[in-house]
Image (cartoon, helix red, strand yellow):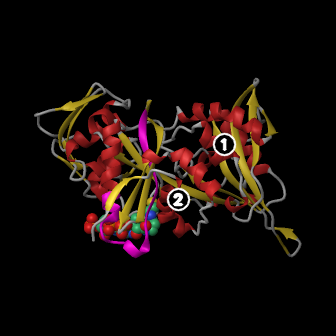
Amino acid sequence: MSFDVRTVKDLDEFSSAVFAIGQYFGMTPTEERMQAFLDQITAERMHAAWSDGSIVGGAGAFKFDLSVPGGDLATAGVSVVGVYPTHRRRGVLRALMRAQLDDAHERGEPLAALWASEETIYGRFGYGLAAFCGDINLAHEYTAFSQQFEPEGTIRFLEPEEAQKALPAVYERVRQQWAGMFSRSDLWWEHREIRDPEERREGAGPKRWVAYERDGTIDAYAVYRHKPGFEAGSTTAELRVVEALAATPTAERDLWGYLLSIDWKAAVRAFLLPPDHALFLLLATPRRLRYRMGDGLWVRLVDVGPALSGREYAGDGAVVFDVHDEFCPWNEGRWKLEGGEASRTDGEADIALSAQSLGSAYLGGVSFAALARTGRAEELTDGALMRADGLFRWDRHPWCPEIF
Ligand SMILES: CC(C)(COP(=O)(O)OP(=O)(O)OC[C@H]1O[C@@H](n2cnc3c(N)ncnc32)[C@H](O)[C@@H]1OP(=O)(O)O)[C@@H](O)C(=O)NCCC(=O)NCCS
């Protein structure tokens, strides 16, 4: 079968390309929805695959910056990847990935990142599992904290319009602390955060916005939904936390203190929390969180040199990687990382690994030692894994709190 891949040129083509994945979500592609989505991705960043004059696959990439340890890098935020079931396993995805990564390379975006529908798909294209995350389902009777405290700030409700104005700055403050968070444009805030259509509520009520203020500054916010329920006259309601972000440790404690103490619910559920979330140490009975962990963000170094030079490191040592990258051969070969800068070298390699493994280690969420123990990296010089881990580790696990 032959097919062409190129970017879409209008709303019709965009809608067909998005429908390649949308159909698996049971999506009804209304014109209004597609237009809003087109505004966010833009036609020049949405690839489609054509066969016999019809679109049979699509792949888009948001343009955003991803926070990396000590910095922020232009990133292709890969999304809406799909192939029509009539054309599966004929190389359509491979062709879309080829076009998309070439595009990011030409644009000078050193990173690409995505959330995977299945863990088996993207490793072959050089994406590595870079962050873990998980859901909690905490019964109301186990919401006590291990240490008593008096909240140091106050919580108030925000109308959505006020949230849209006040909260992007808080989000940005949080993003500077956690690697793995993407920048949100005004359009993103409007369409993805503030708009709250019925079809996104999954049986729960509308979004409620609260801000946490201390000394006249908003240091944290939460957005949540009530999902009411009764059984035998008692509540089975859930409080579903859509997002709870805090720019200071005190704000984080007080914000979760508020969320967990809300009355008339049987449980609090929250999603996509990092494995080192503060709740594990704040709660008296963290086991009751029933944390279920899985893969979060997947990262691909589109250009190894600028990507490695674009983050900060925890130490001053040097390490030489021998990178194997079949899909993006411009990365292939030996790279020396020294003084925070990466450059080509003819020197002896310390660690041999694939681009996928380097993507896993990049944000500091997966250690080189763990990669080596699982056959995903090879230590060529004694002590190199420890040295590389000393450089790449950061003070917290990378966290992307939203699926894009
Ligand atoms: C996943 C999907 C995009 C694959 O598209 P496709 O055109 O069939 O994939 P290709 O034929 O280009 O396959 C490329 C490679 O990926 C492998 N592959 C594709 N889908 C896979 C899957 N779901 N699990 C494991 N391997 C998969 C193929 O076997 C092939 O392997 P190879 O390189 O070793 O030969 C398509 O099946 C689909 O749309 N699935 C439902 C929606 C979805 O999951 N989208 C991804 C959203 S993140």
Q: Which mark is residue 15?
A: 2
* Residue lying at 66% horizontally and 51% vertically, measured from the top left: 242
Q: Where does label 1 land, which residue? A: 190
Q: Which amino acid does the dot numbered 2 rest on?
A: Ser
Q: Position of residue 222 (x, y in %)?
A: 70, 44
Q: Secondary structure at mark 1?
A: helix
Residue stretch in magenta: 73-96
* Residue lying at 14% horizontally and 32% vertically, measured from the top left: 345
Q: Are marks 1 and 2 in contact (CB under 8 Å)?
A: no
Q: Quadrant of residue 152?
A: top right
Pick the front one: 149 or 40: 40
* Residue lying at 56% horizontally and 67% vertically, measured from the top left: 25
Any part of residue 170 in sight: yes
The image shows residue 127, relative to residue 109, as above or below, that is below
Q: Is residue 267 left or right of residue 17?
A: right
Q: Secondary structure at mark 2?
A: helix
Q: Position of residue 35 (x, y in %)?
A: 59, 51
